Image: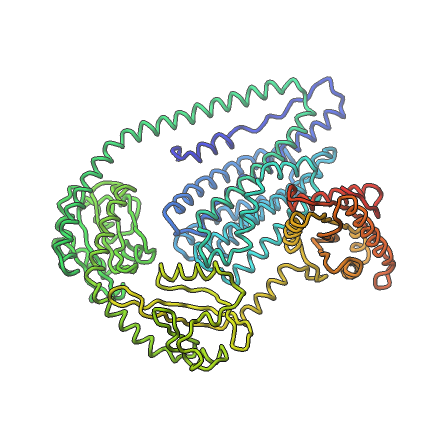
């Protein structure tokens, strides 16, 4: 635990004691003492938020690692460490709750929520066990962890504001929405991580991602709109725009990235975790700023004392950290020589084994005698190979087991027949990876567990042996040393297993060649199936097509023979697409993807295509077989979903997502053509009163009317969008050739908008009390980002609102 650098950092950052309450000066009047007492309570509230957010952050990381449990040893080790960190953060949370309860009178909601948090956390061990046994679905994992975080967030929301602490009260709600925003980024990290691990994105995951991203947007907008400029600046200063853009690009093209494997799990995990850690830093920065407000009220005389205490604690923790680092260095030096000697002996063993591999011609000879060499190593107790090629795992009677004769072999046969539990064999087969048992005292995963002391078995390893990328056998080795199979030894044995695989492939080369010929013959029988198919020669000239292909493409078979399939090529996909297609086909002997072809009548048709290269015994291409599936209906459904994702459900206007994309294009356009573009930000004054007094139906009717009026008054090439609530944005990407001309033109347009919106006198028979507050900004280059352009217009709008509403202001 102390050897982990991450753990040392956590010790340094999070074990510093809470700031002591500044005692009250006896020279202050009673009102000041009362006020400071309230600030003191606010400090406890802030500290509770910090401790709670620490636990939330820890659970977010554990949730993300749990959803990809079993992906790799590295991630599983991270999960193990993270669970320890989560448990420690929960203990800190409980300890502070005791302090918090004794110092601050809790309201009933907060007291009840804290009890729920404790109850749910004690049930977390059950969830962890279900994760380890793969007895829980990904969405259920997310739900269980999110439930605890929801209770923690509810407890933060339940904190009662202190009556006199006006500087703090307005920020509690903003921080809560910021934490909701951060929580759903964590959920998104888990969902995308699982999809990348799984290699596919199903409908349920897509829906969950859409919900997650929507909640993110809503809560971030609330935080952006309501927090102070100082606190929002912390967000802009801490979070790199490049990181956000890279993550947004992955999210927007997730399905494509998964299909093309452009983004791997580790890359996504590092990016999303970096962003979450940045958000964690931003939260801490906001809390620190609020603490500073409190500190400024307290006596300045205690500042030096507090700084000295902090310096002393930092120095003490630094010294402790250095002690652990030095301890690790010494320990590693002691182990270094032993490791080198152990690796040397294993390397000699493997060298002898490799020489032996060259002198065998059959798998049976190879497996039967391999254990004699392994047994000569002083650290090896027993080894065997369980051959599952072409057999069921549980079919013990018919499965082949190769091992050195003796009592352990007899015991192995009897126990394999009796055992129905998971063991080294089943784990290696199910996980398709090496299984390492560092200590038999701690892990019951072998049929020899009860006999480990008797036969001096202390550690073991199981290595899947593959042939043509398919597991055909499991190689199991038992050692008389604890933790014998470390990382370096595992690499050496992996090399041996790879050599075994190559030897087995050499044995089966002729069999594989015959199998390929058989598969080609079977393919010819399957050719006249209901799926469209065609066959070409090595020069990509069509030699045959089936009737299903002719029917789909609307062409006769005799019109195609001898022609190149590029006859159906459309202009929908660029040259680079086809270059990459042939590159992959040449490298992998197959290609799978989507094509847009042109029918005989000129109609565009989307197809899912699989192209396979057929080779002769000399590895030369003789034919190409292409199989097609018409995916027109799927593409139509996809277009509907894309429209729903980029448009507002109520007004039918483009939403924020589509607006951001069009502003990006507008920036490119103004730079290329040297023109000026503009943004008009419209906020409906008194909209909340309309909803509260007349009902949401009237409010929705007002929004629909406003959308209609805006579309009537702007030009066809302008974009009218609703970005949420009562806020609309109009993008005019060509409002003039100079800044002066653009300013005049957009001012005229803004006044027309103000006029038509003020002309809305009644909504469904009710008098309309809503007026527009309008903010305007111009842009003519790429020096300002899309979000900053919107922020400028938003700022101008707020200036207009402060001027008394129903006004127009330029940024």
The quarter of the displayed image where residue 457 is located: top left
Of 169 and 70, the residue lying toward us:
70
In this rendering, the answer to whether 155 lies above or below 654 is above
Of 145 and 219, nearer the camera is: 219
Identify the residue shown where x is 47% and y is 25%: 317
Q: Position of residue 303 (x, y in %)?
A: 62, 20
The x and y percentages for residue 461 are 26, 49
Q: Is residue 291 left or right of residue 570?
A: right
Q: Is residue 378 above or below residue 128?
A: above
586 in relation to 476, above or below:
below
**Which colouring convention does the figure follow?**
rainbow
Residue 366 occupies quadrant: bottom left
**In the foreground, 62 or 763:** 763
**Which quadrant of the rendered structure holds the N terminus?**
top left
* Total marks in image: 0
| Residue 126 is at least partly visible in this image | no
**248 and 187: which one is in front?**
248
**Residue 507 can be seen in this image:** yes
Residue 285's spot in the image, x, y percent? 60, 34
Say whether residue 322 is left or right of residue 365: right
Quadrant assignment for the C terminus: top right
Q: Position of residue 781 (x, y in %)?
A: 66, 44
The residue sitting at 65% across, 54% down in the picture is 662
């Amino acid at each position: 635990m102390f050897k982990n650098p991450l753990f040392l950092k956590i010790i340094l950052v999070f074990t510093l004691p809470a700031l002591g309450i500044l005692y009250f000066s006896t020279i202050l009047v009673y009102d000041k003492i009362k006020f400071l007492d309230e600030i003191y309570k606010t400090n406890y509230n802030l500290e509770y938020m910090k401790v709670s957010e620490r636990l939330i952050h820890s659970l977010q990381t554990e949730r993300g690692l749990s959803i990809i449990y079993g992906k790799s040893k590295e991630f599983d080790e991270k999960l193990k460490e993270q669970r320890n960190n989560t448990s420690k953060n929960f203990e800190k949370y409980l300890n502070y709750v005791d302090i918090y309860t004794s110092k601050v009178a809790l309201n009933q909601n907060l007291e009840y929520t804290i009890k729920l948090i404790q109850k749910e956390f004690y049930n977390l061990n059950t969830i962890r066990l279900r994760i380890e046994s793969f007895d829980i679905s990904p969405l259920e994992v997310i739900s269980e962890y999110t439930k605890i975080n929801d209770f923690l967030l509810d407890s933060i929301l339940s904190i009662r504001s202190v009556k006199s602490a006006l500087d703090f009260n307005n920020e509690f709600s903003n921080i809560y929405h910021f934490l909701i925003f951060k929580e759903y980024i964590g959920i998104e990290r888990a969902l995308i991580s699982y999809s990348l691990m799984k290699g596919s994105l199903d409908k349920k995951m897509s829906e969950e991602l859409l919900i997650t991203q929507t909640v993110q947007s809503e809560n971030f907008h609330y935080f952006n709109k309501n927090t102070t400029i100082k606190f929002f600046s912390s967000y802009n200063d801490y979070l790199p725009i490049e990181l956000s853009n890279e993550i947004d690009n992955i999210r927007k093209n997730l399905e494509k990235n998964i299909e093309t494997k452009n983004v791997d799990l580790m890359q996504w995990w590092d990016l999303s975790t970096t962003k979450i850690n940045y958000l964690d830093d931003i939260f801490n920065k906001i809390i620190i700023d609020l603490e500073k407000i409190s500190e400024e009220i307290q006596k300045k005389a205690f500042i030096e004392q507090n700084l000295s205490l902090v310096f002393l604690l930092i120095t003490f923790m630094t010294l402790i950290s250095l002690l652990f680092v030095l301890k690790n260095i010494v320990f590693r030096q002691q182990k270094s020589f032993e490791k080198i000697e152990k690796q040397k002996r294993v390397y000699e063993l493997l060298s002898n084994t490799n020489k032996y591999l060259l002198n065998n011609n059959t798998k049976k000879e190879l497996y039967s005698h391999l254990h004699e060499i392994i047994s000569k190593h002083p650290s090896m107790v027993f080894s065997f190979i369980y051959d599952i090629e072409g057999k069921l795992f549980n079919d013990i009677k018919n499965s082949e087991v190769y091992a050195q004769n003796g009592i352990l072999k007899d015991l192995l046969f009897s126990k394999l027949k009796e055992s129905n539990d998971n063991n080294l064999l089943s784990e290696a087969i199910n996980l398709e990876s090496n299984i390492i048992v560092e200590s038999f005292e701690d892990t019951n995963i072998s049929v020899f567990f009860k006999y480990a002391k008797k036969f001096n078995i202390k550690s073991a390893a199981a290595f899947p042996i593959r042939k043509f990328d398919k597991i055909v056998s499991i190689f199991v080795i038992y050692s008389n040393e604890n933790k014998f199979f470390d990382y370096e030894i595992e690499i050496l044995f992996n090399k041996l297993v790879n050599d075994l695989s190559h030897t087995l492939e050499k044995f089966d080369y002729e069999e594989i060649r015959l199998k390929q010929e058989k598969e080609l013959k079977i393919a010819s029988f399957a050719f006249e199936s209901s799926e469209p198919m065609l066959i070409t020669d090595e020069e990509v000239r069509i030699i045959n097509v089936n009737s299903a292909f002719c029917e789909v493409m609307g062409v006769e078979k005799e019109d195609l023979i001898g022609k190149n399939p590029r006859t159906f090529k459309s202009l929908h996909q660029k040259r680079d697409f086809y270059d990459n297609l042939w590159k992959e086909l040449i490298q992998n002997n197959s290609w799978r993807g989507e094509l847009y072809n042109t029918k005989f009548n000129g109609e565009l048709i989307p197809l899912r295509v699989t192209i396979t290269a057929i080779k002769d015994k000399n590895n030369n291409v003789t034919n190409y077989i292409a199989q097609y599936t018409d995916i027109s209906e799927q593409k139509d459904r996809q277009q509907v979903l894309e429209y729903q994702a980029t448009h507002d459900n109520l007004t039918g206007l483009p939403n924020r997502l589509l607006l951001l994309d069009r502003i990006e294009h507008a920036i490119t356009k103004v730079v290329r053509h040297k023109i000026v573009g503009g943004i008009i930000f419209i906020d409906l004054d008194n909209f909340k009163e309309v909803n509260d007094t007349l009902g949401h139906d009237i409010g929705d009717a007002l929004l629909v009317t406003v959308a209609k009026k805006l579309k009537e008054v702007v030009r066809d090439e302008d974009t009218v969008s609703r970005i949420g609530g009562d806020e609309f944005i109009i993008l005019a990407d060509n409002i003039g050739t100079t800044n002066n001309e653009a300013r005049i033109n957009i001012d005229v347009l803004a006044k027309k908008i103000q006029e038509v919106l003020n002309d809305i006198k009644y909504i469904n028979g009710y008098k309309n009390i809503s007026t527009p507050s309008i903010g305007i900004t111009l842009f003519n280059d790429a020096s300002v980002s899309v979000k900053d352009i919107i922020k400028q217009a938003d700022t101008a709008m707020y200036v207009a609102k402060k001027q008394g509403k129903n006004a127009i202001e330029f940024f």
